[in-house]
Image: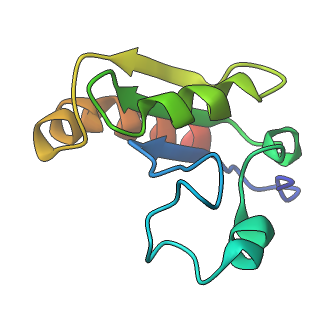
């Protein structure tokens, strides 16, 4: 994803639901292994040429896959891993940091 000239862009993910293989994906997440392969995000991190922030709780069932995804970036994205789960309490706690990140990416 290339930033368009004259624009400000950024991407963020809060507790992203990621699976490292088609076999470990939730049954309804992809139509088939071919659908997973066509839409798999792993190995594509270097194509993101915009500021990125990714956060995931250490109690989130997706933590391992998210750590694998984050490790695939040429430059570690903003955000990180801290206590929390895949739940509203964690998301609310991180929301101000996500709003600040987007504000910075889009308006400064």
- Position of residue 42 measured from the top left corner of the image (x, y, whole percent): 74, 46
Q: Is residue 95 above or below residue 19?
A: above
At 49% from the left and 23% from the top, the residue drawn is 79
Looking at this view, is 15 or 63 the one in front?
63
Looking at this view, is 34 or 85 the one in front?
34
**Farthest front residue?**
23
- Position of residue 18 measured from the top left corner of the image (x, y, whole percent): 53, 49
At 27% from the left and 38% from the top, the residue drawn is 95
- Is residue 104 in view? no
Q: Is residue 106 left or right of residue 44?
A: left
- Is residue 64 in view? yes
Q: Is residue 10 above or below residue 68?
A: below
Q: Is residue 56 above or below residue 80?
A: below
Looking at this view, is 60 or 1 the one in front?
60
Residue 5 falls in image quadrant: bottom right
- Position of residue 3 measured from the top left corner of the image (x, y, whole percent): 82, 53
Q: Is residue 65 above or below residue 17?
A: above
**Farthest left residue?**
89
- Position of residue 97 measured from the top left corner of the image (x, y, whole percent): 35, 29
Q: Which quarter of the rendered picture does the N terminus lie within?
A: bottom right
Residue 94 falls in image quadrant: top left
Looking at this view, is 73 or 26 the one in front?
26
Q: What count of labels does the image hold?
A: 0
Q: Is residue 57 left or right of residue 79?
A: left
At 56% from the left and 50% from the top, the residue drawn is 19
Q: Is residue 91 left or right of residue 102?
A: left
Q: Is residue 56 left or right of residue 95?
A: right
Q: Which quarter of the rendered picture does the C terminus lie within?
A: top right
The colour scheme used here is rainbow
């Amino acid at each position: 994803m290339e930033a368009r000239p004259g624009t400000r862009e950024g991407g963020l993910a809060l507790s992203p639901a990621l699976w490292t293989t088609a076999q470990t994906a939730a049954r309804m997440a992809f139509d088939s292994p071919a659908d997973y392969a066509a839409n798999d995000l792993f190995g594509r991190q270097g194509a993101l040429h915009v500021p990125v922030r990714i956060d995931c709780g250490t109690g989130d069932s997706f933590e391992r896959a998210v750590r694998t995804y984050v490790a695939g970036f040429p430059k570690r994205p903003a955000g990180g891993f801290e206590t929390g789960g895949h739940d509203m309490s964690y998301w609310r706690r991180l929301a101000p940091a996500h709003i600040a990140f987007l504000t910075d990416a889009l308006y400064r």
